[in-house]
Each structure stands twice: as C-alpha cells, then as structure tokens.
Amino acid sequence: MKSLTNCARVAPFFAFPLLSACLFFVKPSSQETASKGSLTEAAPASPSECAHEQLPAEVVTQPEIPPDFKVSAAVLSTLAKDPLAIFTLTPSPFEQPQSIPALMEANPGIFEYLPPDLRKQPDLREKAIALGASTGIRFTKDVKARVSPNANAAISYGSNPASNGYLADPRPVQGFSAGDTLKPLSTQTVGDQIWYQVTAQRKSSRAEDRENYESLSNVGGIPFEGYTMAIDPGWVPASVTEETILADHYISRECTFNGVQNGDLAVYVDFEEVGFESFDEMAYKLMALQEKGTVSPGDRFRIVWRVPADSRERLSLVWIPFE
C-alpha cells in the first residue's frame, strides 16, 4: 500500500493558484493591531501540511474570543469565493473555533464544512440560522410514512426504481430511520396530532405505466402488476421528529482506495471508509485513473465528499487530488 499524498502525479490540494500557500490566523499584539492588519500569510506549505482532517479532537465548549482576535482578510476573501478552501488553511480553523463566526459571516456556507462537534455547538447553530440556514426535521425513531395523516392509513410506497433503464426492484416502502433528515412539504394538524407531509403524490395511468414498463430492461423480473411510476403521498407524525438545521456536510479525509467498477445501475467507487454509487463525472474520472494505473487498490489519498442534507439523496464524491 502506498500513500499518494505527496506523489508528483498528485495535483496540489484543490489545485487553486490562490492557495499555493496556506493562510493562517494570529492574535496580534496591541501595537500591531493599531498599525496594520492582524493576520499574515504563511510560507508555502505542502499539500499534506494544508490538508487537515475533517474530524478534529472533540470540541466541548466554545472558547472565549480574545478582544483583539481577528481573521486574515485574505482568508475571508478566499472563503467567500470558495468554502472548500477551508480544508487547506493552516492552522486549521477547526482548531481555532473562535474564528468560525467570522468565517461564517464571510460565507454562510462554511457551516456545511464544519466537523460534527462544531456543527452541534448552540452558538454556531444560532449563527447559521441567523445567516439564513434552512431548517427541517430529523427523525428520532424509525417510521413508515402513511398515505394520509392518520395512524391507521395505508403504508406509503414509492415508484419502482429504474436507474439507467434497468428495472430491478419492487416498489419501496417510504420509510425513514432515526437520524434521517429532510424538509417537510407541508404540515397538518389532525386532532391533537401534528403531521408532516414528506413526499408528494405523483399519479400515473396504467397505460403510461405499460408504455414505460415495456421500455425498461426488466433485470429484476418484476411483473407488470407490481410496477408503477406512481408515488403515494407520504405523511409522518411530528412526534417522531425534531427540528434541525438542514445543511449538507462536506468531509475531508485520507482514505484507502479499494477500486472502481462500472455497473448497470451505477459506477461504484469503493474506499475502505466510504463508498459512492452514481454516474457523476468524478466517478468516471477516478475510473479512468484506475485504468491508466494512476491509482490502484490499496492506495491512500485524501478525498472530499458531500453528505446531503436530505437523507434520501446519495453521498457524492466532490474532490480527488488528481489533475
């Protein structure tokens, strides 16, 4: 197994000329504060020095902010244009949480790049909401959606998945697990119970279903009687949810590459720590790198991926260290 962090064939971290040198935070002396900007630019650093782990040591409380603490104007300007650059800063702002409010002022999207411990801090959550972060619900228990806001209503089902023209599975129950998050479509109170609509109804005639059914490759042997493009409306009781901030989560981590496979239903990108299923450009790029021998199973290199705010969406690979 080899690490590709510093190999010549690996592009500089994020490959942005602006970030050829890492930027850092300082607490100026009182004399410096009066005479010049509070932060300076560090000497150029290697990609491995810039590439900080997304998950730092646990942060329990927010340290008190020194009265003369400031953040570099260069840092604020960089992050205002591209929040992904937060992973290149050294020292990492995740190790200096007193800097985070200023970074969020420069770019509210910075909240999406914070590690879990910082995302949980009440003051930063309040800051995110004040800056316009969307709110939604998090499920506290496993639950199956109903077709109407009634505990005795029928279970809600989605349409048969037919990725890339392949029909492989029966209609899925619209169920949710504890920890799932999403944005409700509407709210309705029935008696003393509040209900959230979590999926919209989509109708489809049997004639439309037949036409589409016959155009698919039925690799799953699904009978027409069990196929439809229709989606049931979905309702869940508010009692199994809690309010939460809805924000994507970007994670930067060095991972062990297991390989890429081109399948009928997706391109499967597999790392020891995380996997991806998609037809995204990044998946094809990594598959081409594997075919060229640029990367091989067992290699370790840093990647960045996105955990979507809506749990029904898939994880997506957003950055790899190769040109």
Image (cartoon, rainbow, N blue to C red):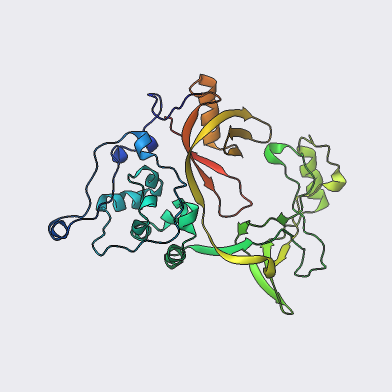
Question: Residue visible at 62% across and 28% down?
Answer: 261
Is 264 on the left or on the right of 38, as rendered? right
Question: Residue visible at 78% across and 70% down?
Answer: 150
Q: Residue furthest bottom?
A: 191
Nearest the camera: 46 or 304? 46
Nearest the camera: 304 or 77? 304
Residue 32 image point, x, y percent: 15, 56
Give the vertical position of 84 relative to 106 (above or below): above
Is 123 on the left or on the right of 79, as rendered? right
Nearest the camera: 218 or 271? 271
The reply to whether residue 15 is in sight is no
Which of the 4 image quadrants contains residue 164?
A: top right
Is 48 on the left or on the right of 252, as rendered? left
**Quarter holding the C terminus?**
top left
Residue 167 image point, x, y percent: 76, 39
Residue 249 image point, x, y percent: 51, 51
Residue 218 image point, x, y percent: 79, 36
* Number of marks present in the image shown: 0
Give the vertical position of 98 relative to 81 (above or below): below
Is 199 on the left or on the right of 89, as rendered? right
The reply to whether residue 295 is in sight is yes
Question: Residue visible at 47% across and 51% down?
Answer: 115
Which of the 4 image quadrants contains residue 110?
A: bottom left
